[in-house]
Amino acid sequence: MELRHLRYFRAVAEELHFGHAAARLHIAQPPLSKQIRQLEDELGVALLTRSTRSVELTPAGADYLAHTVAILDAVDAAGLHAQRVADGSVGRLSIGCVGSATYSVLPAFARALRDRLPDLEVSIRGEMLAPDQFAALRTGDIDLALLRHSGDRPDVGFERLRTDRLMIALPDGHPAAATGAVDIATLRDEDFVAHAGGGRSVMNSVLATVCAAAGFTPRIRHEVIETSTLVTLVAAGLGVALVPEPTSAIGIAGITYHPLAAATPGVDLVAARRLGDPATPIIDRALTVLREVSVPGDPGT
């Protein structure tokens, strides 16, 4: 028995007319009659009663029709689902996100994915440092990473989304806040709050580089993992911080953000994915959405 036998039987059973069923199937009537006979012979039951004027379903035929419709509908649904998986409109996607992008790009990205790919199952891990994201990409725990670029890796492909300018986060009432743009050299005697060091955070290295260019080494009193914790400590007056501009999207009282007085290169936000994987249309479609919600910009704009 083949699927075509079920499709032939369904057409005859629904039309109750061999000529109409043959026209519906775009085949000649004699071969159709022969196929239905073969099906009945294989099953060992009569599915139809035939006369010169009418075709009727037997009780066994009516029961077989119900199962036939369910089978064919399931086959059609499976084919449609496979096509949607192949074009990336359905499936699962796991995203890891660095702290500052968690509060800026990620909300718009998640909303756009929901609107454009409503059948895509999305899971999100926010506030991930770069090494943790690379490890999660390697193990397959995440499919796509949003992070600050930390150098090329042979097993990871990067795509720059935009460059964010650097800002100084100050607690309310800090004397430097009155000047608008802040010369970071004036903060040489301040305590700094920074992301984790030891190669775990790109922003920790950026802070060291920017301060070195201003002639000092930052006095880091607090190292944190989450960006939300960093800004909370600044708001509490426990130090100042160098952050990407999107960090200001975290709505917390007691903190202000100020541009640097001297021109300073920004920090890239990139999307990262595993290299060498089979075709991944879901990631391709997600990246298309991500490019649209991550409007590129140059430092200082």
Image (cartoon, rainbow, N blue to C red):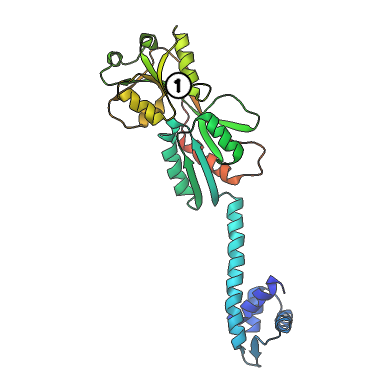
Q: Amino acid at mark 1?
A: Pro
Q: Nearer the viewer, residue 251 or 113?
A: 251
Q: Give the residue at x 47% y 34%.
A: 294
Does residue 191 appear in this view? yes
Q: How many marks?
A: 1
Q: Quadrant of the C terminus?
A: top left
Q: Is residue 238 left or right of residue 33?
A: left
Q: Is residue 282 left or right of residue 167?
A: right
Q: Give the vertical position of 131 relative to 50 (above or below).
A: above
Name the image quarter holding residue 227. Answer: top left
Q: Give the residue at x 65% y 83%.
A: 18
Q: Give the vertical position of 238 relative to 89 (above or below).
A: above
Q: Secondary structure at mark 1?
A: loop
Q: Nearer the viewer, residue 43 or 55?
A: 43
Q: Give the residue at x 51% y 50%.
A: 120
Name the image quarter holding residue 46. Answer: bottom right
- Of all residues, the one furthest to the bottom in this rendering is 52
Name the image quarter holding residue 76. Answer: bottom right
Residue 293 location (% of width, % of height): 46, 37
Residue 38 location (% of width, % of height): 74, 81
- Of all residues, the one furthest to the left in this rendering is 173
Q: Nearer the viewer, residue 109 or 273?
A: 273
Q: Quadrant of the N terminus?
A: bottom right
Disc 1 packing (10 Å; few <14; some 14–19; many ≥20): some
Residue 190 location (% of width, % of height): 35, 13
Residue 239 location (% of width, % of height): 34, 19
Circle 1 residue? 299
Q: Give the vertical position of 49 relative to 283 (above or below).
A: below
Q: Is residue 267 left or right of residue 193?
A: right
Q: Give the vertical position of 141 relative to 149 (above or below).
A: below
Does residue 266 appear in this view? no
